[in-house]
Image (cartoon, helix red, strand yellow):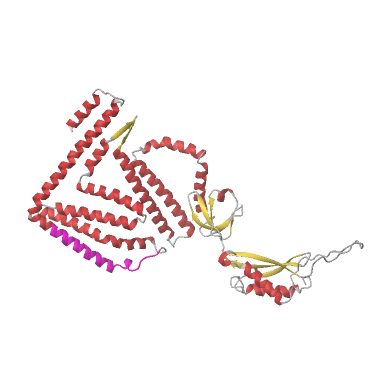
Amino acid sequence: MDTTNTNTLTIATSPVTGATSPVADAVATKNSVVLETTGQSLMQTAQHYLEVAHQHLFMADTYIQLGLIAGIYLLAYWLGSKLRKASKFVDNQPDAKDHPIRRITYRIDKMLFPLIAIILLKVVSEFSASVIGANWILDLALTIAVLLFVNSVINVCVSHPILANLLKWMMLPLLFLHMVGWLAGIIEVLQGLSLNLGNIEISAYGLARVLIFGTLLFWVGRASNNVGQDIIRKQESLDIRTREVFAKLFEVALVCVIALLLLNVMGINLTALAVFGGAVGVGLGFGLQSIASNFISGIIILLDRSVTIGDYIEMEDGQKGFVRHFKMRYTTLETYDGKDIMVPNEKFISSTFVNWSHKNPKQRYRVDFSVAYQTDIRAMVEIIKDVVAEHPQVLSGDEYPIEERPDCEIDSFGDSGVNVFVEFWMEGIDDGKNRVGGDLMLSIFETLREHNISIPFPQREVRVLNTDYTVTNTTKKNN
């Protein structure tokens, strides 16, 4: 180590000829010396392990350990198969509606074999070290078992193929290097490969750490958010509004934790964020005001319970639909046309909206029509009330209060006839699968025709006041 430092110092202070600066030449020389020294060290380590393997090739304890490894893997496979058959969680494949814990326990089935092998190898390795004084082959088998277990975890928990391959290519080599004791040397090499930009030193180890742990934190945060919110929303003991509040708070807390961990991995001092927090506060007052307003409005909506999942909302501008999702910035309304309307959360605070199903799913609707003046209005009213009450989705009968039963009344006297309307109550919104208004209009039309009740329509007469003016039929008749 002293020789390396001396060589680096001598090269850094030697005269420089060329266009490059002395500092750049010194850094480049230092990096090349570190790489050469590390390469020699790794070659010596590999040669040492080859010599050890050759020495133990003809020793009895080597074959004892190999026999133990074979027995352990067979025992782990047998125990894993027995546990799979005895467990009721792996009998039937769960669907999307099942509880998240149920789906997780079903996936554990594929991780039983390497997990049992790890436990048995660890126990036997400690026993072998104290009895026969050698366990390096068992340690190698334990390393392989851990790699198999991590590979199984990635295959089971990560569904995205690109992200799964990325985690395998990053985590498995790092885990292997850590377990064989080579990771510390490689980290030292990467720390030596650095680039100075003013007062900032950027090393290869820092970049690799941010890349690896940033990807891992991103995946862990996304998976934890999906599983956590799914578990919260499956809690039937809580009402739907409380579940949404806890789901939103869980998402916010998880984002904050992941952000703090990522800042720590990047080597940023968290105490230095006080100045940054002041800058963010100023930004919230100007450029980020709308984002902060929508975020806080979403929290207020969930806490005051004015809107919840499944409510039918009609906005002030006429847009309406069912509430399907609450996001940090907007709320999703699903219309009967299959469209999703993204409504900023701030609109629910600053403007008026109608919640059709806030307290009671029962709604009152009306159908307007007209009849001729010569109609027996009293008889017609009773007929229409009976027809409307026969519809299966209309609330009718003695079990309902009189104000919720179908009612037919005169609205006004029009130019051509009597304007009448019929009111009725139903559960849900009069649209989609609950389309009742259209059915009632058809039933009313058929009933009026059946009882010879005419529906008036505007008629106009043309009177010719000028007697000298004659009107002739210019329509040509077909021969």
Give the tally of numbered discs.
Answer: 0
Image position of 217 (left or right of 337): left
Position of 213 relative to 388 (above/below): above
Looking at the picture, tell me which residue is in the foreground, 189 or 437.
189
Q: Position of residue 178 (x, y in %)?
A: 23, 47
Would you say residue 405 is visible in this rendering?
no
Q: Which residues are magenta?
A: 66-95
> Could you say where residue 39 lies in the image, as x and y percent from the top left?
20, 39
Q: From this viewpoint, which residue is outermost toward the right?
A: 468
Q: Would residue 406 be found to the left or right of residue 205 on screen?
A: right
Q: Residue at x 51, y 39 (%)?
A: 287
Q: Main secondary structure of the magenta part?
A: helix
Does residue 67 lie above or below 271 as drawn? below
The reply, left or right, for residue 181 in relation to residue 444 is left
Q: Is residue 96 visible?
A: yes
- Occupied quadrant, residue 153: bottom left
Magenta stretch contains residue 69: yes
Q: Quadrant of the N terminus?
A: top left
* Relative image position of residue 33 (x, y in whole percent): 22, 33
Q: Residue furthest front?
A: 479
Q: Residue at x 54, y 51 (%)?
A: 343
The stretch drawn in magenta includes residue 29: no
Q: Relative to residue 217, is residue 7 depicted above or below?
A: above
Q: Quadrant of residue 121?
A: bottom left
Q: Position of residue 363 (x, y in %)?
A: 60, 64
Q: Quadrant of the C terminus?
A: bottom right
Asked whether 305 or 208 is in front, the reply is 208
Give the quadrant of residue 28.
Answer: top left
